[in-house]
Image: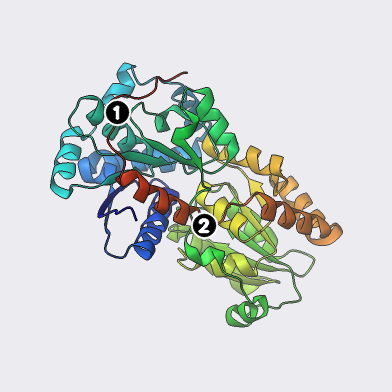
Amino acid sequence: MSQLRRLLILSATYGEGHQQAAYAVRDAVMAMQPETEVQIVDYIRAVHPVLDSVVRYCYLKSVRFAPALYGWFYKGTSQIPPSSLIQRQLNSLGIDEMEATLHEFQPDVVLSTFPTPAGVVSHLKQQGRTRVPSAVVITDHAIHSQWIHPWTDMYFVGSDYVRHGLVARGIPGEAIQVTGIPVRPAFHQRFDRLALCHKLGLSPQLPTVLVMAGAYGVMGDVEQICAELFHWPQPLQVLVVTGRNARMKAHLDELLPDASNRVRVYGFVHDIWELMAVSDLMLTKAGGLTISEALALQLPMLLYRPIPGQEVQNAKFLVRQGVAVLARNRREVSEHLVDLLLLHPDKRQQMRHQAQQIRLLHAAERIADSLRALASRQPSRAHYSYQH
């Protein structure tokens, strides 16, 4: 059996998905091989705390108040080749600190769930300063050059769509594994919906809508949509997760006493699988990990205001696969709710069936197994060229 003694996972906290993917892989590795030492590093925060704070602030403000600007930035950086000046600068961010970490920790494999550190490790390998095997987990159904680096040994992707996109950019097929996007084992359980309804104080007879505002509560118009759902003319139940947006939660809590429907408002939720498992439909903005969790539980999705860039690509993928519908404005949100909850509930069943067809369960376990194999591989001295 291949041994993976030490695994270094490089992540970031811009949104919650990159970290959750890191946790899922860590847990799968340690379940397979408990003696493995796993270290997760929030990379940007570790190498440059001030820059991390600035970038986080700009990211959250742009996706909430100027999504078009973020979309322009995302698109503008999607075709940057590794040889460009800006990419070389990104690949040098914290490079000496990264080399010191590798020297100190001596990992058998480095796994990146965020693109920037993947580029740094690739650059170190290109310069001959390390030979550690490296891999990335692409956490969206999207193709972007920031994930693609010539000295990355393995790419773990969520769908054939991403695989084809990487091959088109020059990545050899043998360096890509379609594993699915890793989620925690709890999302692979079978749930007793009646027991969950009793636990959460819900009625099993009423349709339940789960509103996911994002880890930082940045989904547009969510407060206005919730205000409408709280007074929806047909009886339903509403579960709202505001993430780390305390202001939004406080505002929605103020609306609860006057709500005509049964409503529960939560902040950041660790056991989100229970809320998903008890729900009939999820309203979300299409974050990579959230949609992967929903697919694992076969939860139909109503997508609204996905962030331009990776979330728009996620939304297109889900709609093409028949597991979600997309609303462009609040009026269409209402129309889809009426259609899916009242007029044609059979469409939800079709979406559940489609989710069962396309979901890839146990991605974290597949990745963990591949990392063990990668740890025993002889380091290579040359890699592929990049097409853009």
Disc 2 marks a residue whose amino acid type is: His
Residue 90 bears which disc, if any? 1
Q: Position of residue 164 (x, y in %)?
A: 57, 30
Q: State the residue position of label 2.
A: 362
Q: Is residue 332 above or below residue 269?
A: above
Q: Is residue 325 above or below residue 255?
A: above
Give the residue displayed 32% in from the left and 21% down from the top.
Answer: 86
Q: Position of residue 317 (x, y in %)?
A: 64, 39
Name the residue nearer the viewer: 258 or 125. 125
- Image-based side of 178 in relation to 226, left or right: left
Q: Secondary structure at mark 2?
A: loop
- Image-based side of 102 in relation to 314, left or right: left
Q: Is residue 276 visible?
A: yes
Q: Secondary structure at mark 1?
A: helix
Q: Kindly indicate the quadrant of the structure image that contains residue 25.
A: bottom left
Q: Is residue 2 above or below residue 147?
A: below
Disc 1 marks a residue whose amino acid type is: Leu
Residue 229 bears which disc, if any? none
Give the residue displayed 44% in from the left and 27% down from the top.
Answer: 145
Give the residue displayed 54% in from the left and 44% down from the top.
Answer: 158
Q: Position of residue 46 (x, y in %)?
A: 22, 46
Q: Kindly indicate the quadrant of the structure image that contains residue 327.
A: top right
- CA–CA distance in space, label 2 to label 1: 32 Å
